[in-house]
Amino acid sequence: MTSVIIALPKAEVAQGIRNLLVRSGIPVAGVCTTGAQALALADGLNYGIVICGYKLADMIYSELHDCLSAEFSMLM
């Protein structure tokens, strides 16, 4: 199954989305509040989806997208 990473600037919102996905049967690999955390988590995974907002604490979505490997998709 595809790995899901949630990267949002507010941890409470990210946890809420995580809980919703987990209750629906979708496993979540991790919750991050910065792009650097999301990239570190993605390095340990082969492929997946990153759910993110427009702006994180350290970068905007396009910078994160450019740094992700081609095996990752982004849902903004």
Image: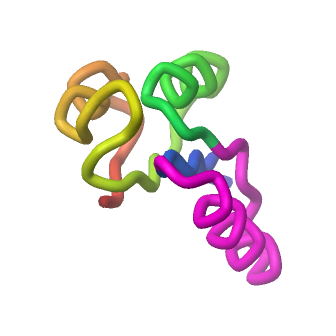
Q: Nearer the viewer, residue 29 or 63?
A: 63
Quarter of the image with the C terminus in it: bottom left
Location of residue 72 in the rendering, given as x and y in whole percent from the top left corner:
40, 38
Location of residue 53 in the rendering, given as x and y in whole percent from the top left corner:
35, 55
Location of residue 5 in the rendering, given as x and y in whole percent from the top left corner:
58, 46
Question: Looking at the image, which residue is at 72% across and 44% down?
Answer: 29
Q: Above or below — where is 3 with respect to 34?
A: below
Q: Can residue 27 be spotted in the picture?
A: yes
Question: Looking at the image, which residue is at 48% across and 20% down?
Answer: 36
- Report the coloring of the rendering: rainbow
Q: Is residue 58 left or right of residue 33?
A: left
- Image label count: 0
**What is the quadrant of residue 41 in the picture?**
top right
Q: Above or below — where is 46 with respect to 22?
A: above
Question: Looking at the image, which residue is at 66% across and 45% down?
Answer: 31
**What is the quadrant of residue 57 in the picture?**
top left
Question: Looking at the image, which residue is at 34% across and 59% down?
Answer: 75
Q: Is residue 35 magenta?
A: no
Location of residue 69 in the rendering, given as x and y in whole percent from the top left corner:
36, 23
**What is the quadrant of residue 25 in the picture?**
bottom right
Q: Can residue 49 be spotted in the picture?
A: no
Q: Nearer the viewer, residue 40 or 2?
A: 40
Q: Nearer the viewer, residue 27 or 36?
A: 36
Quarter of the image with the N terminus in it: bottom right
Task: Tell me the magenta residue range.
Answer: 9-31
Q: Is residue 12 magenta?
A: yes
Q: Above or below — where is 30 with respect to 24?
A: above
Q: Is residue 25 left or right of residue 35?
A: right
